Image (tube, rainbow, N blue to C red):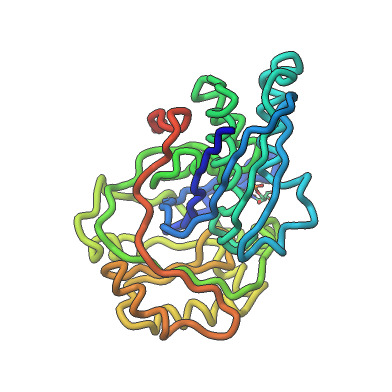
Amino acid sequence: MSSLHELAHAKINLYLHVTGRREDGYHLLDSLAVFAGAADELRLTRDAGLGGEVKLRIEGTFAPGLQDDQADNLIVRAGRLLREHVGADAAARLPDVGIVLRKELPVASGIGGGSADAAAALRLLMDVWNLSIPHDRFMALATRLGADVPVCVAQRAARMEGIGEELSDAPGLPPCGMMLVNCGQSVSTPQVFRARSPVFTPRADLPARWDTLADMVRDLSAQTNDLEAAACAICPEIADVLAALRNAPGCRLARMSGSGATCFALFDSPAAAQAAQAAVRQGKWWVWAGDLYRGGARQASAAAPLHA
Ligand code: C5P
């Protein structure tokens, strides 16, 4: 029996501008996404049966929040989407698989955990089912699972535009460390989008690379997360997290990621971020500190160049 393994890294929005709105209600964004070392883990095992069924088991720190709606889990939906894409005849010949998800990222928390899991499942299933789908078609399928899934497929820093599916190269990133803090409350993404200020923010002007963290922090300080104020109004504890991060020794910038509630802070190094953890940790807050993940995805299906 073959066993495949993938990490699904947390996606962090270093800034997030809402630049407009589509007729279907989805918001147009300009955001710089990077990946943190923190990750969920997926293990896939090939089963004896045929038909391409994906049997999911969830374990790990945040498993209890996900047990109720397993049939609706993005990993299971990723399998369904690929089966639909290949058609009933071909799907009938696909081996069934078991996927064990070790859920170590907080659920519904603005760091794309569910999207990263879906993207990792797509990479694993493409591999074990030996599928070849043209890159543009594959990315369109990924977008159907969620606006954050395309960036998680390649799992490397990228600028996100459109509703999140138009990807282009991120500026070169300097060495730095990162801390993530989640207060333990999940906030609803549609609710946060509905509560945001109606003013649109222009697209950011970014350099080709940042040589130092000071350069990056200077430019990021001129940008915003346009969902932060709305998320803080819905969940005031996010403001407490941001205050704790800004007071932490060595913090260079603190901001909310995505639609929250997880916030991030940038430090000079992973060691500086780890050293500051004790100053931030309180109550039931989830705290992680370490390096950015700069490795990209393993599978060839995700390795195609980004589109400008
Ligand atoms: O695509 P995803 O399922 O992650 O989006 C969840 C919800 O967030 C959408 O139903 C929509 O209300 C909101 N959203 C949005 N604009 C985006 C992304 C998400 O309005 N670009």
Residue 73: x percent and y percent?
A: 71, 47
Residue situated furthest front in the rendering: 1
Residue 89 visible in the shown view: yes
- Quadrant (top left/top right/bottom left/bottom right) for the C terminus: top left
Whether residue 97 is situated above or below residue 266 in the rendered picture? above
Q: Locate residue 50: give its quadrant.
A: top right
Q: Locate residue 37: give its quadrant.
A: bottom left
Q: Locate residue 228: give its quadrant.
A: bottom right
Residue 232: x percent and y percent?
A: 60, 73
Q: Which of 56 and 47 is in front in this view?
A: 47
User: At 60% from the left edge and 58% from the top edge, which residue is drawn?
Assistant: 103
Relative to 68, 83 lies left or right:
left
Residue 306: x percent and y percent?
A: 40, 33
Whether residue 66 is situated above or below residue 127 in the rendered picture? below
Residue 162 visible in the shown view: no
User: At 33% from the left edge and 83% from the top edge, which residue is drawn?
Assistant: 249
Question: How many numbered marks appear?
Answer: 0
User: At 43% from the left edge and 78% from the top edge, which residue is drawn?
Assistant: 245
Residue 45: x percent and y percent?
A: 61, 38
Residue situated furthest left in the rendering: 211
